[in-house]
Image (cartoon, rainbow, N blue to C red):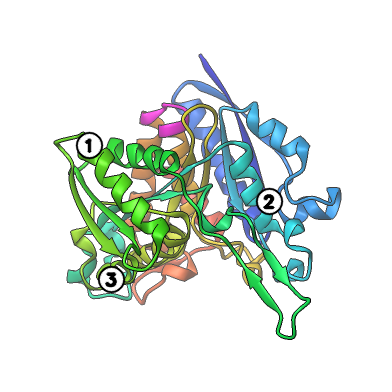
Amino acid sequence: MKKYKIVLLSGDGIGPEISEVSKKVIKKLSKNHNFDIEIIEELFGGIAYEKYGSPAPDKTLDQCKKSDAVLLACVGDIKYDSLARELRPESGLLKLRSALNLFANIRPVKIRKSLLDASTLKKEIVEHVDLIVVRELIGGIYFGKPRGHITDTKIPKAFNTMVYDSAEIERITEIAIKIANQRNKKICSVDKSNVLEVSQLWRDTVLNITSKDKNISLSNMYVDNAAMQLVRDPGQFDVILTSNLFGDILSDLAAMLTGSIGMLPSASLNNDGPGVFEPVHGSAPDIAGKNIANPIAMLLSASMMLKIGLNEEEAAENLETAIDKVLSKGFRTADLADRSSEVLSCSEIGDKIMDEI
């Protein structure tokens, strides 16, 4: 029997609720598909700061490094916004990504037929959406130096540095090529090369790398146009390749094509070592503890973990099929509800999915 060790980071807000559903589902899948999975829970985010004075304690990072995969729920709360930046939960995410060298963020955006009417866009606009955003994750303006505040002037100023080297761009492009070759062999590289020197390097490097694979069809798009096209005609995209800042914005925009950001998973990967699998949504502290959160994005992240991180494809397919069956029967959490659906709590929809596994 295969054995795996994963680290579960429930984090803040609705994290513990959706994590509890995920634990039950993963345990049932492991039993049904004949593998053993050890789930190690560690503190991360605001709750870790409260106990250890750091949103990403060394103990947590060490366990993550020794695991086969990391399943992360969400972090953050408005009550931590007054902390120094390095102590905020979101800084813990940056530290985790850097510690595990997670340079590639993969966000699939696929319309589930049973949720076509949940999108705020017209059905004919979104019905064929099936795209993946490939975002560079540990470079660019979020990590660039120098950065800081200038306070010894009459008017306070702040500055950040957007920087990439060609090696960083090459390796994320190679990930996009690998994914595109498993799909429709189309990559749209998004940049702002008409304004930014760093984007000029991005475009030149992407062209150089993709030109070596004759199967790949490459197009380029400015980020402002890409945002507009995602709303106007999202079905045109297959693989979107972009930098950290642009990918952060565009992937959340793309998430809403499905009707709810509570439906989308993601994977953050490196070339060697455990990946981190997490839902796209935030911690939603306003609904935390009310048992009304949507756990499906977390479960779909668990599916990506099973498929990509642990190579348990049958278990992943079982989980996604179960989710689709529950949705097709009209069961919904509040964020997806319409007049014809039956609204269930977070734990209740988890139980329905369990029944279908």
Task: Assign a secondary structure to mark 3.
Answer: helix
Front residue of 335 and 32: 335
Q: What residue type is disc 3 on?
A: Asn
262 relative position to 20: left or right: left
- The residues tagged by marks 1 and 3 sit, at their Cα atoms, a distance apart of 25 Å
For residue 340, what is the image quadrant?
A: bottom left
Horizontal and vertical percent for residue 169? Answer: 40, 44
Above or below: residue 38 compared with residue 73: above
Q: Circle 1 is placed at which residue position?
A: 181
Point 73% across, 46% down: residue: 56
Above or below: residue 231 compared with residue 153: above
Point 66% across, 52% down: residue: 16
Horizontal and vertical percent for residue 248? Answer: 46, 60
Disc nearer the start of the sequence (1/3): 1
Q: What residue type is disc 1 on?
A: Asn
Marks 1,3: beta carbons within 8 A: no
- The residues tagged by marks 2 and 1 sit, at their Cα atoms, a distance apart of 34 Å
Q: Is residue 241 visible?
A: no
Q: Circle 2 is placed at which residue position?
A: 92
Q: What residue type is disc 2 on?
A: Gly
109 relative position to 150: left or right: left
Q: Circle 3 is placed at which residue position?
A: 225
Task: Assign a secondary structure to mark 2.
Answer: helix
Disc nearer the start of the sequence (3/2): 2
Horizontal and vertical percent for residue 155? Answer: 70, 85
Q: Is residue 68 visible?
A: yes
What segment is highlighted magenta in the picture?
A: 307-313
Task: Assign a secondary structure to mark 1.
Answer: helix
